[in-house]
Amino acid sequence: MAQRRIFTAADLSVWRVSPAYNSLLGFITKIAAAVQGRILSDPCSESPGIKSVVALLERVDKITTDTPPVQQPSRFGNPAFRTWHSRLTEMADELIEQLAPGQRLQSELRAYLLDSFGNATRIDYGSGHELAFVVLLDSLMLRGVLLPTDFAAVCFTVFTRYLTLVRRVQQTYRLEPAGSHGVWGLDDFQFLPFYWGASQLIGSGIKPAQLADKATALRYGDDYMFFGCIQFIFAMKTGPFHEHSRVLYDISAVPEWSKVCSGLLKMYEAEVLMKLPIVQHLPFTSTFSFDAAPGTVPVVLPDRPLPAGLPIAGAIAPQTTIGRISGTGGPASGSLRRLPPRTEAPAPAPGAPAP
C-alpha cells in the first residue's frame, strides 16, 4: 500500500539517503546518459514494457477526446478536468493490470498514475505531477516491466508521448501551474525535458546561446527535447523571451551544454526533490521504498552533496539558476543578468560535426 512518509523538513534528510531517492536519481541520470548526443528520431531498443506504457497513454488520451471542456467565464481551471480525472480513476486498476499482467501492482502504482496528470481539486499541474509519472516509470523498471536496455526509449518514446498528452490536458482544461515561480521559474509546468534535452545537445554543435532564438527552436524542436520545450513556450507566451522566461534566458549565458546539464540536475534536486511542498505528497511503496533494508547502511550517491542555500519560499533566487549551473555563484548584485542580443551563426544540421 502506498503511504506518505515525508511530513517535515527533518524527513527530507532521511528521504535523501533512502533507497527510493537513490533509485530515482539513478533512473533520471541513466536516461540522460542514454540520450546524450542523440536526436529524438534515433532508433532505440524498446521492450514490450515500453509499448505497454505507450498504450496506456493512448487510452488516457482518449479520455480527453471523450471529455470536452465546459463553457465558463473564468480563464483557468475548467471543471471538466474533474470529470476527466474521475474517469481516469475508474480505469486505473485496469490500466495498471495491462501494464503488468498478473503482477497485481495496483496498490503499488495506482497513486502515481492518478497523480501524473494534475490535481483534480485544484485543477493544476506542476513538477510534482511530472515527478509522480517518473516514479511510476522507475517503479516499473524496479519490477522488471521495463528493462535496463529501455533507458533511451523511456525518454524518446514514452516521455515524449506523455509530454504531448499532458500539454493537451493543460490546454484543454486550462490547468493552472502548480506552485509556479512565474518568470523566476524554469517553466510553468515541466522540468525534466530540459535536463534530458540538454544532455541530447552535448556535442551537437548548437550553443546554449541559441536557446532563446525562435528560429532555432522551430528548426530543432522535433529533434531535441529542449528546443521542443522552447518551441512550446513561444507558442504559449508573447513578448520578449528575456521577460517571460528569465531563467532560461539566464541559462543561455552558460558556455557548454554539459554545464547546463549538470547544473539542471543540481537545480532539480534543490527545487523539486528536496522541496517539501512538492515531495510531501509523494507516496512510497515496498518497491519505491523509503526505508533501507534491515542491516544496510544508507549511502548517498557519490558527488551529490546536499545543495546549499535551498530557498524556503518565494521566487527562485538568481544564485539557484545561472550560478548553480555555471558554478560561478550567480550575479553578485542579486538581480538578473541582462545579456545583449545574440548573433550566432546558424546551427548545423543534426548529426553534422561541430565547427
Image (cartoon, grey):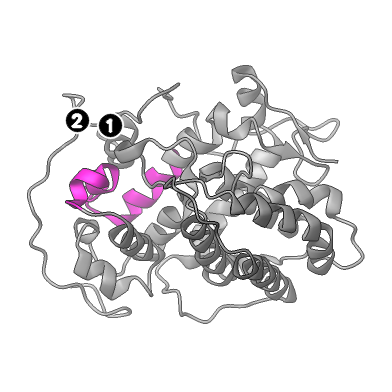
Q: Residues within 10 Å of mark 2 (few under 14, many from 20)?
A: few
Residue 37 is marked as none
Report the front residue among 345 and 87: 87
The reply, left or right, for residue 155 in relation to residue 141 is: left
**Image point 92% across, 65% down: which residue?**
102
Q: Position of residue 279 (x, y in %)?
A: 61, 34
**Image point 8% across, 53% down: which residue?**
341
Judging from the image, what secondary structure is the residue with disc 1 in? helix
Judging from the image, what secondary structure is the residue with disc 2 in? loop
Query: What kind of residue is marked 2?
Result: Pro
Compared with 247, 195 (above or below) is below
The reply, left or right, for residue 108 in relation to residue 321 is: right
Q: Are dots 1 and 2 in contact, CB under 8 Å? A: yes
**Image point 78% across, 66% down: which residue?**
99
Query: What kind of residue is marked 1?
Result: Pro
For residue 30: magenta? no
Question: In the image, which residues are magenta?
Answer: 239-266
What is the quadrant of the C terminus in the image?
bottom left
Q: How many marks?
A: 2
Report the front residue among 285 and 97: 97
Q: CA distance from mark 1 to mark 2?
A: 7 Å
Identify the residue position indicated by label 2 in the image. 331
Q: Main secondary structure of the magenta part?
A: helix
Compared with 146, 273 (above or below) is above
Q: Residues within 10 Å of mark 1 (few under 14, many from 20)?
A: many
Among the two numbered marks 1 and 2 on one chain, the one whose residue lies closer to the N terminus: 1
Q: Position of residue 170 (x, y in %)?
A: 49, 55
What is the quadrant of the N terminus in the image?
top right
- The image quadrant that residue 278 belongs to is top right
Identify the residue position indicated by label 1 in the image. 318
